[in-house]
Amino acid sequence: MIKDAEAHADEDRKRREEADVRNQAESLVYQTEKFVKEQREAEGGSKVPEDTLTKVDGAISEAKTALAGTDIAAIKSAMEKLGTESQALGQAIYEATQAEQAAGGADGAGTQSSDDDVVDAEVVDDDQERK
């Protein structure tokens, strides 16, 4: 039995690697699809150019096609491409957010009012001090 396990150890290692790669790729596809969907349904429209979203969609379909097959190298390659495209998507969102905040910061500077009726107080429990 031990000899049998040792004989199939390499095969088991390959199967485990295949399962790990498939799981990572499926997870990346799911997360990226969800992210793209959120961008398209965002209030006020997407902050990302449509061509960037189209590139990501292409990488998603390429990864799904690779996952339908059994070639681990193709899955890894598609996963790398999808990772690169999703990073570009994240970068575009980051840049759009920074530009939006810079424009909002310049317009909104000095508009905060000091009419807040905030009272700073400290609560003291007299019963605790008597014990």
Image: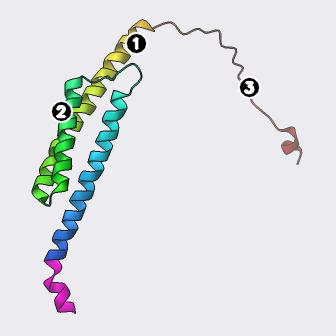
Q: Quadrant of residue 36?
A: top left
Q: List x then y, in percent, for residue 1.
A: 22, 93
Dot in front, 2 or 1:
2
Q: Is residue 74 above or below residue 110?
A: below
Seen from the viewer's position, the closer of residues 87 and 116 is 87
User: Is any atom of residue 79 visible in this view?
Assistant: no
> Bounds of the magenta span?
1-10
- Residue designated by label 1: 104
- How far is disc 1 from disc 3 in space, using C-alphas? 34 Å
How many numbered marks appear? Answer: 3
Q: Quadrant of residue 50?
A: top left
Residue 50 within the magenta-colored segment of the rendering: no
Q: Which mark is residue 121?
A: 3
Q: Which numbered disc, 3 or 2, marks the residue that appears first in the sequence?
A: 2
Contact flag, marks 3 and 2 (Cβ < 8 Å): no
What SS does tag 1 mark? helix
Residue 2 within the magenta-colored segment of the rendering: yes
Asked which colour scheme the image uses, the reply is rainbow
Residue drawn at the location 16% of the way across and 91% of the way down: 3
Q: List x then y, in percent, for residue 11.
A: 15, 75
Q: Which numbered disc, 2 or 1, marks the residue that appears first in the sequence?
A: 2
The secondary structure that most of the magenta stretch takes on is helix
Q: Which mark is residue 55?
A: 2
- How far is disc 3 from disc 2 in space, using C-alphas? 56 Å
Q: Is residue 51 above or below residue 84?
A: above
Seen from the viewer's position, the closer of residues 127 and 13 is 13
